[in-house]
Image (spheres, coloured by chain):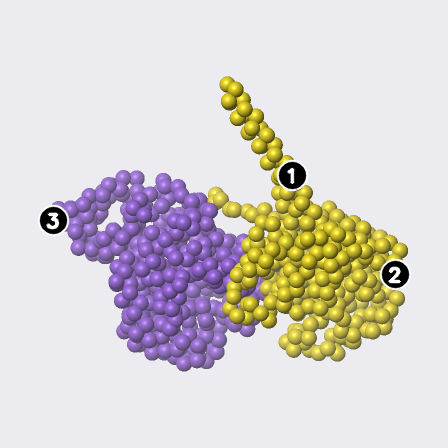
């Protein structure tokens, strides 16, 4: 048979701990619970305030946004500053790559400016993997959204929100509504929910917005909103991108809202204590009615606050894993030097 | 120069030959098997005991980098790579720069190939000017200029009326047309097969129907036009079925598959490796198995390398931004013989798919060791185990997903028109 070179999971270091954070696929449940527990520790249990800690003092984090973003970039920046890191924001779509500099050249240049971590958003699926494959060994890559592939910190903040409000993700029924096909958020949420053993993951939308092989994601598909919401504990609404409306995927905003918009009446199909989430920014009157977005079951603004704590958790875990690894490697070197010296002394005495 | 190759196992499906014999070469041609012509005095005797003697392979699709893509390959470098892989005749598709839509470009390619004098290079002419799918090219002039067939490379004509006209015009002059089937609208900027993997990775995807709906349309238009048509690089199970039905109805169509589609699947994309980015995309395991069954049962007539040498700048990019293509000349034979190891094909079938069949489709008398034909042949050592590495690839394109694979058997020596053009141990 042919020798197939199977590469190890590039997100993990030699000790099986997070080195980069690219996707939830291939991670173990304990990686996720570690992030959730750490995030908890950054949050004041009474006030939900997030204190500033010196964990990343002296470290430089570069936020490379090849695609525009407000919320994700801002919460990353706040998280970085609360960890006392030095922060650089680079809006790359407007600079180097437009001048014909290759992606790798851009990255290597930034690396030479002593970056310790890159937070990357890019319009190509797999872009974060690509960076992680090519960065220097001491540099870490954090995926802030790549194409239609993954947005793992968003999914983790959603899990954190669910855990805060529902106690646990385990055994819950969760419905994700809207454009699953083009959504990196949905893909990461689905992986997180299945790693944390949600009882059932449903996706709701017309066939034009559902991936062609949903069974590969382990979800149940509903085209009927009311049937899909029946008895769920959590409703996650996705943003309907404007550009989808211009294509041939949907006939009109109005018909979409009529069929899949979350209204107070529709929400009654879910469990009475169900929570409503949305990664933002919301389109009022397109996927969600204002009465629901601002209503008692909505936790949309809490998600934003928790996003800071979760991103702090991911960054601090990655940096402390690197420190642990360096420490154990240093110990190994000392041991070898010791034994080499002993051997040399022995040789001389003989 | 008179050469005798002694005691080799001669495998030539074109004359149903598979036995140990001596083969005699004089003035660039094969002049006898078993018995030399009268008065034959060899200048050189080669002992091929334990080795196989195969006809030089005929590759119906290999890009050579010239003209226009010189940063990633030249006719000189790529024909060297070809003969290292046992290929002595190859067709280059018209997606050169400028496009091979004039006699001048076709002649340029052949002139460069004659200068390199390493392998026989046959240009394929463009079916439409600039491959734009709008105006017919001067097909007859292209034929006069040495084009053995016409095609649209990877840019199929989308407008059915223009395709109909192109096919009818080609049929009027008895020209062979090679068709890649892909509906541009259904492809819709996709880069990976629509399946479980693209769903998981969030890669924009190309459904099998992008190929099959185009194939259905093309089969009908081919039949109406009465043109000699060959379908290039089919990639889905359903396409195999449709071609089988067309053949059963008596339509004189043929088809080929790219060798990588017989080995790789969508699963090879799982770490976003841009080396697995090809067009048509790597499809499902079921598709791969159907393609293998297609070559086994003869529905698929030929295997091609679809060689596309690319540089680091074109491949070291996120998957969707990278250029599709694999550097395939040097693995075509080795991989096809792996299908023999894996009991998909018998040895004679495997060689036939690489020699006699493509030669027949093109209407050429290469791909054979019959007395009187050009002495294009390969001495192959079935016992030589080797591992593919980018350092030993002769092609300027190091873009092979097969790097690190192990192979049984290696080309030891290749002759082109009676001259040794490759010697494994000399490199």
**Which quarter of the picture shows residue A157?**
bottom right
SS assignment at label 2: loop
Chain A palette colour: yellow
Q: Is residue A303 left or right of residue B133?
A: right
Q: Left or right: where does residue B183 sit relative to residue A286?
A: left
Residue under numbered circle 1: A328
Residue A159 in picture, x, y percent from top left: 77, 56
* Element on which disc 3 rests: loop
Q: Chain of mark 3?
A: B
Report which residue position mark 3 lands on.
B38
Closer to us: mark 3 or mark 1? 1
Total label count?
3
Report the chain holding disc 1: A
User: Same chain, marks 2 and 3?
Assistant: no
Whichever of callouts 2 and 1 sits on the residue coming sooner in the sequence is 2
- Nearer to me, B41 or A79: A79
Task: Identify which residue is drawn at 48% across, 78% down.
Answer: B159
Residue at 64%, 49% in the rendered image: A19
Q: Is residue A288 left or right of residue B137?
A: right
Which residue corresponds to mark 2?
A273
Callouts 2 and 3 close, C-beta under 8 Å: no
């Amino acid at each position: 048979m042919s020798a197939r070179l199977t590469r190890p999971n590039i997100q993990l270091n030699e000790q099986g701990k997070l080195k980069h954070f690219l996707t939830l696929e291939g991670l173990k449940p304990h990686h996720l619970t570690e992030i959730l527990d750490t995030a908890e520790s950054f949050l004041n249990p009474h006030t939900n305030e997030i204190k500033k800690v010196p964990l990343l003092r002296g470290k430089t984090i570069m936020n490379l946004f090849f695609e525009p973003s407000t919320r994700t970039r801002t919460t990353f920046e706040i998280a970085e500053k609360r960890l006392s890191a030095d922060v650089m924001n680079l809006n790359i779509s407007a600079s180097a790559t437009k001048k014909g500099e290759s992606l790798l050249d851009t990255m290597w240049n930034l690396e030479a400016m002593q970056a310790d971590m890159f937070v990357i958003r890019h319009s190509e699926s797999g872009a974060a993997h690509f960076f992680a494959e090519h960065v220097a060994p001491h540099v870490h890559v954090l995926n802030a959204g790549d194409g239609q592939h993954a947005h793992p910190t968003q999914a983790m903040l959603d899990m954190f929100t669910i855990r805060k409000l529902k106690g646990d993700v385990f055994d819950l029924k969760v419905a994700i509504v809207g454009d699953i096909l083009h959504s990196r958020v949905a893909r990461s949420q689905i992986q997180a929910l299945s790693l944390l053993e949600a009882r059932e993951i449903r996706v709701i939308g017309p066939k034009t917005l559902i991936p062609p092989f949903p069974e590969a994601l382990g979800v149940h598909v509903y085209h009927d909103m009311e049937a899909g919401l029946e008895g769920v504990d959590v409703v996650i609404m996705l943003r309907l991108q404007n550009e989808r409306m211009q294509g041939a995927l949907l006939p009109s905003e109005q018909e979409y809202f009529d069929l899949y918009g979350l209204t107070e009446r529709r929400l009654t199909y879910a469990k009475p204590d169900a929570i409503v989430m949305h990664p933002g920014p919301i389109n009022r009157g397109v996927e969600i009615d204002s009465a629901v977005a601002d209503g008692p079951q909505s936790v949309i603004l809490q998600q934003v606050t928790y996003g800071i704590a979760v991103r702090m958790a991911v960054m601090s875990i990655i940096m402390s894993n690197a420190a642990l690894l360096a420490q154990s490697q240093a110990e190994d070197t000392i041991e070898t030097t010791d034994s080499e010296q002993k051997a040399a002394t022995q040789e001389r005495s003989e | 120069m008179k050469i005798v190759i002694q005691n080799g196992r001669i495998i030539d499906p074109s004359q149903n030959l598979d036995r140990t014999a001596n083969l005699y070469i004089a003035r660039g041609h094969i002049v006898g098997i078993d018995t030399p012509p009268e008065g034959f005095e060899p200048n050189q005797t080669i002992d091929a005991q334990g080795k196989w003697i195969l006809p030089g392979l005929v590759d119906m699709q290999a890009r050579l980098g010239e003209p226009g893509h010189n940063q990633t390959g030249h006719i000189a470098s790529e024909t060297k790579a070809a003969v290292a892989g046992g290929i002595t005749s190859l067709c280059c598709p018209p997606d050169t720069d400028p496009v091979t839509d004039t006699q001048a470009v076709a002649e340029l390619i052949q002139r460069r190939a004659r200068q390199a004098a390493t392998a026989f290079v046959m240009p394929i002419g463009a079916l439409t000017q600039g491959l734009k799918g709008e105006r017919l090219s001067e097909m007859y002039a292209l034929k006069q200029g040495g084009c053995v067939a016409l095609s649209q490379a990877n840019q199929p004509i989308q407008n059915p009326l223009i395709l109909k006209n192109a096919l009818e015009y080609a049929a009027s002059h008895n020209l062979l047309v090679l068709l890649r089937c892909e509906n541009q609208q259904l492809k819709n900027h996709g880069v990976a097969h629509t399946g479980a993997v693209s769903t998981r990775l969030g890669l924009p995807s190309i459904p099998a129907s992008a190929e099959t709906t185009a194939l259905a349309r093309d089969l009908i238009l081919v039949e109406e036009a009465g043109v000699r048509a060959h379908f290039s690089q089919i990639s889905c199970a359903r396409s195999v079925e449709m071609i089988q039905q067309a053949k059963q109805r008596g339509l004189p169509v043929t088809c080929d598959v790219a060798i990588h589609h017989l080995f790789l699947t969508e699963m090879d994309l799982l770490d976003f490796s841009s080396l697995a980015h090809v067009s048509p995309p790597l499809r499902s395991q079921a598709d791969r198995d159907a393609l293998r069954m297609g070559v086994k049962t003869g529905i698929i007539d030929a295997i091609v390398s679809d060689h596309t040498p690319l540089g680091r700048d074109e491949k070291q990019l996120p998957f969707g931004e990278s250029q599709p293509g694999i550097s395939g000349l040097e693995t075509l034979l080795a991989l096809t013989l792996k299908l023999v190891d894996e009991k998909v094909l018998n040895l004679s079938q495997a060689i036939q798919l690489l020699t006699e069949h493509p030669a027949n489709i093109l209407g050429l008398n290469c791909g054979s060791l019959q007395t009187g034909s050009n002495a294009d042949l390969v001495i192959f050592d079935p016992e030589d185990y080797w591992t593919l590495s980018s350092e030993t690839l002769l092609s300027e394109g190091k873009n092979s997903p097969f790097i690190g694979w192990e192979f049984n058997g290696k080309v030891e020596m290749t002759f082109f028109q009676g001259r040794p053009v490759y010697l494994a141990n000399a490199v």
